[in-house]
Image: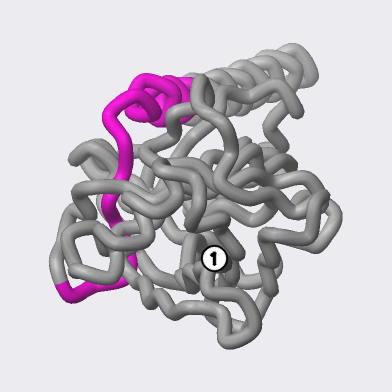
Amino acid sequence: MTNKFKKPKMHELCSRSFNSYSVRQDDQDENNGIIEGVPIVFEQKTDIGGWFSETIARGAINDDVLRDVAFFYNHDLNTKPLARTRTKKLTLTIGDDQVDMIAQVNLKRSDANDLYLAIQDGDIDGMSFMFRVEEEEWSDLDTDYPHRRITKIGYVQEVSAVNYPAYEGTSINARTDLSLDGDKKALDEARAKLLDNNNKKISLELEKLKNENRMK
């Protein structure tokens, strides 16, 4: 059984992380480092806190939500962005299976240079992105382990380099703990809506039976 819900635009931010990176130096400028990664993947199932599985649907993201995105380290929004789309130092390209990132970072900045070297050494190999769910489909809500399919992402705030992807050798399913409360809330809301819909159906059936009995 699949239930479709449209989330309000102010739904809490979530994050998802993956481990896919490469770095290289710009041939034209030795102070310009190039970081390439995959912050978002489609049609890959992942576990969310042990509460439910999740898939980001192909087509859930369009170019409009990627117009003003910043690149950070470990979602630390209190620091200066390492690159951003509006300065054209950060490029996010939507493909069939994933969103590819190319970030041009200034290696004269100590924070950018430290991150660049850590990625180059293989000490950091995770990517994450912070986003807001706008539309989703839930299935198996009456089980202990339902599934959420995100069909529309309404807002992407930033993409980040992260320390700990959950599973080495995969490109899915590492996340920051800070987003788990919002994901648990989304599951609770979906189950509550399903219960409310079921109760309404039962009430309508009872009312129908009462009317039929009056007619006899």
Q: Residue at x 24, y 72 (%)?
A: 170
- Percent x, y of residue 67: 81, 52
Q: Residue at x 33, y 28 (%)?
A: 180
Examine the rendering and report whether any part of residue 117 can be seen: yes
Answer above or below: position of 42 versus 109: below
Q: Give the residues in magenta.
A: 169-189
Secondary structure category for the residue under label 1: loop
> Which residue is the site of mark 1?
31
- Percent x, y of residue 45: 35, 64
Q: Could you say which is closer to the camera, residue 203 or residue 207?
A: 203
The majority secondary structure of the magenta stretch comes to helix
- Left or right of 82? Residue 93 is right
Examine the rendering and report whether any part of residue 139 can be seen: no
Answer above or below: position of 176 versus 106: above
Answer above or below: position of 127 versus 195: below
Task: Examine the structure image and report whether residue 34 is included in the region drawn in magenta.
Answer: no
The C terminus appears in which quarter of the rendering? top right
